[in-house]
Amino acid sequence: MRPLDWVVLGGALTAIVSYGLYKGRGSDTMSKYLLAGKTMPWYAMALSIMATQASAITFISTTGQAYVDGMRFVQFYFGMPIAMVILSATAVPLFHRANVYTAYEFLEKRFDTKTRALASIVFLIQRGLAVGLSLYAPAIVLAVIFGWPDRLTTLVMGALITIYTVTGGIKAVTWTDVQQMIIILCGLVVAFFMIVHMLPSGISFLDALYLAGATGKLNAVDMKFDLNNRYNLWSGLIGGCFLALSYFGCDQSQVQRYLTGKSIAQSKLSLLFTAMAKIPMQFLILFVGAMVFVFFLFERPPLLFQNVAMNQLQSPALREQFAPIDTRFGQAFEQRKQAAEAMADARRLHDDSRRAASLAMYRSAQVEINNLRASGAKLYQESSGEKGFNDTNYIFLSFVTRYLPPGVVGLLIAVIFAAAMSSSSGEVNSLATVTVIDVYRRHIRPQATDRHYLWVSRLATAFWASYAVFFAQYAKKLGSLIEAVNLLGSLFYGSLLGVFVLAFWFRRVSGTGAFVGMLVGEAAIFAAYWFTSISFLWYNVIGCVVVIATGVAVSIARPIERPA
Amino acid sequence: MIHSSVMPPPDRAHLPDEPPPFLGTWPRVYAAILVYLAALITLFYVFTRMFS
């Protein structure tokens, strides 16, 4: 980081906090603090929804994923527009008319207290486990790239979001999300143009596209149906739709965004705009990753993108074992570079036989590079004792810090901060809302003044922000459990979705039916997780279907008693 | 009475569903979104095939 980068980063962070404090003024009632007094326009809600969903790891990891695995991850979002249409037609008007603060409050109006309580607890566990990770994940990557202490980074990010989230409530969160989303989009566009500009002089954008395609990085659509393949058109459309229905329809961190709308129409527009903008945005992020791969066809990349691992491999203790790997890596890179140049030439000359020969040469060099990277990783793991080494998350930032000019590096680090802060502030805000509305006001102190609830909301927000920072401070000690925690989130969505589907469309289902359905649905998801190899995207479908079937069956067996 | 000391919430049970600012009705807007999705997938499919 050079002085200009610090100026850009500092300026962006100061602007975010100042803007949050400014826009959050006047949040002096519980309704204004938790629902912005229902005054938000559609574009602010839409950008806030997108910013809350896009975590820092989305930018760090997704670009790396495109580098390694191509663009097929974009299919994960194909079900989202379908889900948004369904939610706009059903959930949005129902939530607005029920005049609720939380999605789970609606469940009591429709079913009973125990169903609301169970759904609230599921949300608090699932979101509570994830909230610190939004801060921790980017901090650990920045620690490796820049050597910044990860605890200090999480503390700074946590302190910044606490300032505007506690004082301004959801209004501050939403408007800072808008600003953060603008920073994120600007950063992405600048990164894209910089990469294209930095390609070798003989390589045009069309050549880069051709090379990315020939090397398997532009695999945006895979039509083959395979339950065990995480990303294909069908898992994206069906599994992705269920996941988006769960996330945008049952997760308070998203529902609360569109509950702040001025009207039903404004809330609907916010979801539909997100549906239209999200896929192109994700495509752009992945495309940036694919272009980074093309860039490294002509510029020698490090054997491993993680600095700590590379420093250890180059240390005197490992130098002797590492030297032959490094030499062979250099040779394989040169062979791959020649193959890439030959492929680009063949494309321009429409020479099919040369194209085939150079592609074969590329593939052989790429296999050698992959093997050498695996050897390097193995050597590092053996010497450090670290298991499951993976440098995907370091690819993009490694490129940014080595090749991009001063100012742009600061902008892209600001993007990482903005993404982490927008996700965390939304999560903290929603956790506080559920704690106050579904727990405190419902079960502990139901008859207090509005001012009392406002202060409890502020305290709850401060508590969850502190909890997020505290959890992030100790996340390192969880080690590989972090993956398990992430997975844990996906284990709960299906049953939450199922109970809301019952609430919206199955009028004869009783509270007991919904409650038992949720429990059985959870059991089915855990059974699928433990005993099958089915991709996690399908858990939402399984959970939802089981909750509906059980809820209907229980309600038929024990119908609601209606007065004669 | 629950929440007696809190301001009573405004009645929103009969909140009207305003028409969208374009295309006249919401079903038309929903259809447009689904057509957009289909177009996007087709475009990505062509993109994949063209450069594979």
Image (cartoon, rainbow, N blue to C red):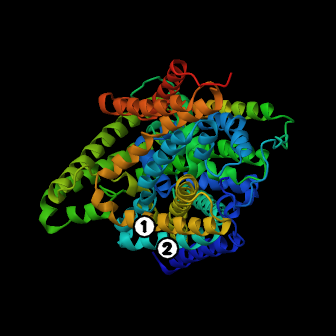
Quadrant of residue A86 within the rendered picture: top right
Q: Would you name the residue on which mark 1 appears?
A: A469
Task: Note whether A355 is above or below A158 in the view shown.
Answer: above
Say which amino acid is labelled 1. Val
Q: Quadrant of the C terminus of chain A?
A: top right
| Earlier residue among tags 2 and 1 | 2
Callout 2: chain: A
Q: Residue at x 25, y 47 (%)?
A: A374
* One can see residue A536 in this view: yes
Q: Is residue A521 above or below residue A38?
A: above
Foreground pick, A447 / A33: A447
Q: Position of residue A125 (x, y in %)?
A: 43, 50
Q: Which residue is mark 2?
A: A159
Q: Nearer the viewer, residue A11 or A332?
A: A11
Give how far across and how far down residue A131 sits, in percent.
Answer: 46, 57
Q: Is residue B5 above or below residue A480?
A: below
Res. A222 in view: no
- In the shown orientation, is residue A194 left or right of residue B35? left
Name the outermost residue toward the bottom. A3
Q: Position of residue A11 (x, y in %)?
A: 59, 77
Q: CA distance from mark 2 to mark 1?
A: 8 Å
Answer whether labels 2 and 1 touch (C-beta < 8 Å).
yes
Left-right relation of A425 to A449: left
